Amino acid sequence: MITICDTGPLVAYLNRNDAHHAWAVAVMKHVRPPMLTCEPVLTEAVYFLREDDVEVDPLFQLLEREALRLDFDIWTHWPRIRTLMARYRQMDLADASIVVMSESHTRSQVLTVDRRDFSVYRRNDRQVIDFIAPPKR
């Protein structure tokens, strides 16, 4: 099973003060590397880590160790991203990229903290996306 990683779990894993830190650490121990992600997720993660004065180098170390791998070309998939973002008003570029990645990798699961949106999003327009998220509070 391929794991596609959204922004929230990366930030939670690297930021000890994040509300989902313990959950992210526990989940990451069971995920088979490499997790796949995309540039929009890295952009958001760097932004949120810096907002909380957390070093971003550990994020790059995940790439260096190949625990995390970039696996998406926006240029190739922008028409689908555009369609998804028009369909789902709340969807940002990172979420659209993650959904398209899940369409490209049929045996995949999405690691996210965004249970609400990923419960609504559909891959290939009708298929439920298999995701792992923190328990409901």
Image (cartoon, rainbow, N blue to C red):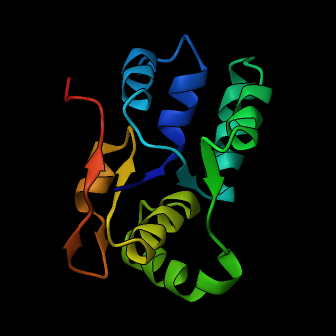
Quadrant for residue 108, please give it: bottom left
Give x and y (percent) for residue 80.
50, 84
Quadrant for residue 132, please give it: top left
What residue lies at 53% left-to-right and 66% top-to-bottom? Answer: 97
What residue lies at 60% left-to-right and 41% top-to-bottom? Answer: 67
Task: In the rendered view, tell whether residue 60 sits above or below residue 85.
Answer: above
Task: In the rendered view, tell whether residue 18 sits above or below residue 84.
Answer: above
What residue lies at 45% left-to-right and 62% top-to-bottom? Answer: 91
Give x and y (percent) for residue 47.
72, 37
Quarter of the image for the C terminus: give it.
top left
Give x and y (percent) for residue 89.
41, 67
What residue lies at 37% left-to-right and 29% top-to-bottom? Answer: 27
The residue lying furthest to the bottom in this view is 79
The residue lying furthest to the top in this view is 17
Quadrant for residue 90, please give it: bottom left
Give x and y (percent) for residue 22.
40, 15
Total marks drawn? 0
Left or right: residue 109 compared with residue 8? left
Q: Nearer the viewer, residue 35 or 43?
A: 35
Left or right: residue 110 compared with residue 37? left
Task: In the rendered view, tell whether residue 63 sits above or below residue 106.
Answer: above
Quarter of the image for the N terminus: give it.
bottom left
Q: Nearer the viewer, residue 21 or 69?
A: 69
